[in-house]
Amino acid sequence: MFSANLSNPVEIRTRHKVTGAQGVTLSVQEWGNPNGTVMLFAHAYGTSHLAWLPQVTSELAHEFRMITFDHRGHGESDKPLTPDGYNSRDVFADDIQAIATQLNLKKFILVGWSMSGALVGDYLTKYGDSNIIGLVLVAAANKLGPSFFASQVGAALAHPTSQGIFSEDLFTQIGAWNFLNSHLATDPFNQDTKDIILANSMLMPLVARGTIIMRDEDYLPLYQNLNAPILMVHAADDQIVLPAAAEQLKAVRPDAQYISYPRGAHAPHWDNPENFNAELAKFARQAVQNAVSGVA
C-alpha cells in the first residue's frame, strides 16, 4: 500500500499550462527521465494527477518520461460550469490531443484509470492509435451511462450513499465522497492520503459529476479494432468498476494481457504499487521493442 506524506512535498520536474478544447486551460506535469519512453497518465473521476503518486515517485522515474494531467473539471485545470464542457467526446479527445501536441509526445504509452478508460476512448475514437505504442487500462470502464450501469457498475458506486456526490448539500457530498473513496483500496489509507483524495473529489463541480458519467457510450467496438497492444489491470474486490469490464474487453480482444489481482480494490496501483509498477514497466519495454521491430 502506498501512503502519501504531506509534510514531504513531491517535486514535479516541469509544469505546463496547455490550452485544450473550448479554450480550457489544462494543468500538466512532467516527472522522471526526460529522455525516457513517454507514459501519459489519465486519472479517475473525482481525482487528479496526484492519483499517480505511487508511480511518478517510484523507480519508474529513472527510466520513463511520465506525463500526468488534470482532466477539465478536476484538480488544477479549468472547471467549466455548463454541461457542454463535459457532454461530448470531442472535448476530452481534443484535450488529450492538445497535450500530446504541445509536449511533442511521440509513440507513447497511454494509461487510463477508471473513468479514463472511457475518456481515452474519446481520444482514440477521434485521433486513432497511430501515435500510441501501448494502452494500459487500470480498473477501467469501457462504457458510460446506461450501458455502464447495466453491466459494469459495482455495489459501492451504485449504493444510495454514493449518490450523495450529486447532492447540492455540502455535508451530504462530503459523506458520500468519503464512503465512495473508502472503496478505492483494500486497506485503509493513512490520513494524508484521505485528505488528498477528499480534497480532489470536492474540487470537481457538480455539473461535471453529473454530466460525464451519464454520457451514453460503449467503447468495446473501438478497443476491438485498435492496433495497439493492451494491458488490463483489475482487482477481484473492485466494487466501483466491476472486473466484468475487463472481462468484456478480453472477450473482444483475446490478445489483450489481463492481470487480475486476487486482493485489491478500485486502485490497484495504490494497493499493489510494486507489482503494478513492475508490470507497467515490463509492458512498456515490450511495447517499445514491438514498435521498433514493427510488430503490431
Image (cartoon, rainbow, N blue to C red):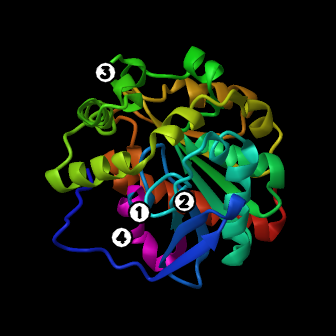
48 to 207, vertically: above or below: below
Q: Which residue is mark 1?
A: 55
Mark identifier at residue 57: 4
Q: Quadrant of residue 39?
A: bottom right
Q: Residues within 10 Å of mark 1 (few under 14, many from 20)?
A: many
Q: Is residue 114 in view from this perspective?
A: no
Residue drawn at 38 percent across, 51 percent down: 203
Q: Nearer the viewer, mark 3 or mark 4?
A: 3
Q: What is the x, y in percent for residue 197?
A: 30, 49
Task: Compare marks 3 and 4 and give the one earlier in the sequence.
Answer: 4
60 in the magenta segment: yes
- What range of the chain is rendered magenta? 51-67
Q: Which residue is mark 3?
A: 161
Q: What is the x, y in percent for residue 67?
A: 54, 69
Tags 1 and 2 in contact by the CB under 8 Å rule? yes
**Marks 4/1: CA distance?**
6 Å
Q: What's the amino acid at mark 2?
A: Phe
**Marks 3/4: CA distance?**
33 Å
Q: Nearer the viewer, mark 2 or mark 3?
A: 3
Task: Compare marks 4 and 2 and give the one earlier in the sequence.
Answer: 2
